[in-house]
Image: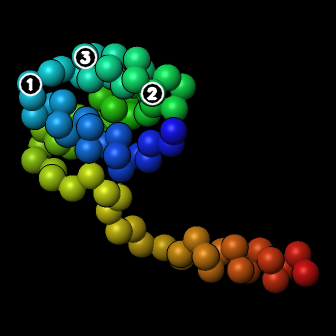
């Protein structure tokens, strides 16, 4: 079964809301998802911190730069 990053972030948000710490959160991840779980550093440093700071969204934020599809199209044109 595939679990997306957004779904994993939602789980992190729920676990933190329930009062669990970072280690408990990641331990449950590793137990449930095995090698597809987000790395400990990603869980602790990035997402737990963001949720403690008040972030509510689990989706990626908009970033500046060229969209991926443009880069792929360009790469195809160069190869052809």
x, y (%) of residue 14? 17, 37
CA separation in Å, label 3 and label 1: 10 Å
Q: Is residue 80 left or right of residue 11?
A: right
Callout 3 touching callout 1 (CB < 8 Å)? no
x, y (%) of residue 63? 39, 68
Q: Nearer the viewer, mark 2 or mark 1?
A: 2
Q: Which residue is mark 3?
A: 24
- The residue sitting at 77% across, 74% down in the picture is 75
Residues 65 and 27: in front is: 27
Give the SS element for disc 2.
Answer: helix
The answer to whether 39 is drawn above or below residue 64 in the figure is above
Graded by Cα atoms within 10 Å as few (under 14), some (14 to 19) or many (20 or more), the crowding at tag 1 reads few
CA separation in Å, label 2 and label 1: 21 Å
Graded by Cα atoms within 10 Å as few (under 14), some (14 to 19) or many (20 or more), the crowding at tag 2 reads some
Of the numbered discs 2 and 1, the one sitting upstream in the chain is 1
Q: Which residue is mark 1?
A: 19
Residue 10 is at least partly visible in this image = yes
- The residue sitting at 73% across, 80% down in the picture is 74
- The residue sitting at 84% across, 79% down in the picture is 78
Callout 2 touching callout 3 (CB < 8 Å)? no
Give the SS element for disc 3.
Answer: helix
Of the numbered discs 3 and 1, the one sitting upstream in the chain is 1
Graded by Cα atoms within 10 Å as few (under 14), some (14 to 19) or many (20 or more), the crowding at tag 3 reads few
- To which quarter of the image does residue 70 belong? bottom right
CA separation in Å, label 2 and label 3: 14 Å
Q: Which residue is mark 2?
A: 33
Residue that protrudes farthest toward the front in the picture? 1
- The residue sitting at 15% across, 21% down in the picture is 20
x, y (%) of residue 53? 12, 43
């Amino acid at each position: 079964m595939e679990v997306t990053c957004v779904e994993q972030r939602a789980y992190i948000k729920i676990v933190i809301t329930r009062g669990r710490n970072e280690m408990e959160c990641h331990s449950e991840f590793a137990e449930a998802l095995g090698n597809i779980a987000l790395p400990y550093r990603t869980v602790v440093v990035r997402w737990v911190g963001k949720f403690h700071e008040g972030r509510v969204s689990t989706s990626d934020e908009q970033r500046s730069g060229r969209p991926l599809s443009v880069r792929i199209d360009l790469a195809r044109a160069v190869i052809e």
